[in-house]
Amino acid sequence: MTTAPGKGTGTTTEAGTVPLWRHRPFVLLCGEQIASSLGRQITALALALLAVTGLGAGPFGAAALLALTYLPGALLSPLAGVLVDRVPLRGLLVVVTAAQALVVGSVPLADAAGQLTRPHLYGVAVVSGALTFTLSVGLQAALPRVVGPDGLLGANSALTAARTSGQIGGPALGGVLVGLVGPAPALFAGAAAYAVEALFVLALPAALNVRLKAAAMSPLESLRSGLAVVRAAPRLRRMVLSGTGLNLGSGAATALYVFYATRELDLPAWQLGATYAVYSAATVAGALLAGRFARTAGLWRATQVCGLAAGAAVFLIPAASLGAGFALLLAHQVAYGLTGTVWMVSMTTTQQLVTPKDMQGRVAGLVQAVLLTTVPLGALAGGALAAWLGNVPVLLGAAAIALLSAATLWAPTVADEPPAR
């Protein structure tokens, strides 16, 4: 395992300083992120289109699908964090990724047998969401063990680039597969990507299975200790609170996105897939810029600037109803993907730096739960209100909430204590 990385671009091992791209455990994490992103993008697009075009879901039904995907993360992430700090980490990651492949693969099998129903589809969304966010907490806890604190900013940027490079092909591939074979059979490709992800995780070092001190604590004590870390970091606390409002607005907009684009803007599947692909390309650019921008401006300033820009970008979605819908949705995905990625990398790095090594899972779980709580709320509220008021008024309100929440980052705050080592 690693001890301390060098200048954010390499990691120090027993053999000396090694660049991140030559450090085998980190390279495996990059491969896992590419496979995972392909699986998630294909699955998200196919499930949404299957609900809308195959099972006749309306605005609320489409929004409910997104909400059910995020709801397990909002409710179970703190418990996932406790679990991550108490059990062999590599073993947990292998089980989660393998289960994901089986769950997603159940949809095309049920469809082929003529037994696919909305409850099945929504059940897959719930279970898949729980597995996805458990994996997210586990990987956030694993990264500091792999690269050490000084390498976190560069490692988070590189992992984000790896993840989003997979997302570039995922939506386009998903759109092509849906067009060729239909949304249900396209999910076989999503399940295959998750199976490949499980192989990458299985190849991670056995040292990740070392039990930490949290194994001797009760679950309630573990949660309290994680909450104490968040309370003691003022800027992290501000980032989390602002992020909940940003997610509320963007969650409502995202829930309506497929329905709005296909039914109101009449975008064909290939154009819808292209907007997701452009978003992925923008996130790659954001990941490449995040490290340099955050080192130059500082983690806190990078979060402030990019949070505000991401909130403003949501207004481009309702603006698409005025004309040039495809072009404006592309512009939204570029702006939101670029600035939202820098915001995410900066906040994640701040979180990991202020968290002791043996508490990474608990803090990641608590932060993730708070951030995710408003996503299903925004999705359900957006879907319900859109069925009553229409898509555009709700999208305008969602954009206003996102922008105002991001603006709170500019309110005066005190600096965090020195990062924990």
Image (spheres, rainbow, N blue to C red):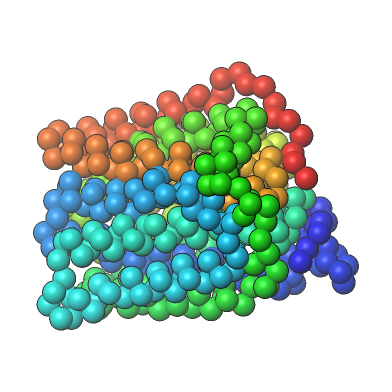
Task: From the viewer's side, name the closer residue of 63 and 313.
Answer: 63
Task: Write down the quadrant of residue 262 in the picture.
Answer: bottom left
Q: Residue at x 70, y 50 (%)?
A: 357
Q: Is residue 44 left or right of residue 301?
A: left
Above or below — where is 141 with respect to 254?
A: below
Image quarter in which the C terminus is found: top right
Task: From the viewer's side, name the closer residue of 316 and 244.
Answer: 244
Q: Is residue 53 left or right of residue 343?
A: left
Q: Residue at x 75, y 41 (%)?
A: 420
Image quarter in which the N terminus is found: bottom right
List the single residue furthest toward the top: 412
Task: Write down the quadrant of residue 209 in the picture.
Answer: bottom right
Spot occupied by residue 199 in the image (x, y as percentages of width and height):
53, 78
Spot occupied by residue 382 in the image (x, y as percentages of width and height):
24, 38
Q: Is residue 248 left or right of residue 323?
A: right
Q: Residue at x 14, y 66 (%)?
A: 117
Spot occupied by residue 71 in the image (x, y as percentages of width and height):
34, 48
Above or below — where is 195 with respect to 136?
A: below
Residue 236 appears in the figure: no
Q: Residue at x 56, y 20 (%)?
A: 411
Residue 56 appears in the figure: yes
Spot occupied by residue 348 in the image (x, y as percentages of width and height):
60, 46
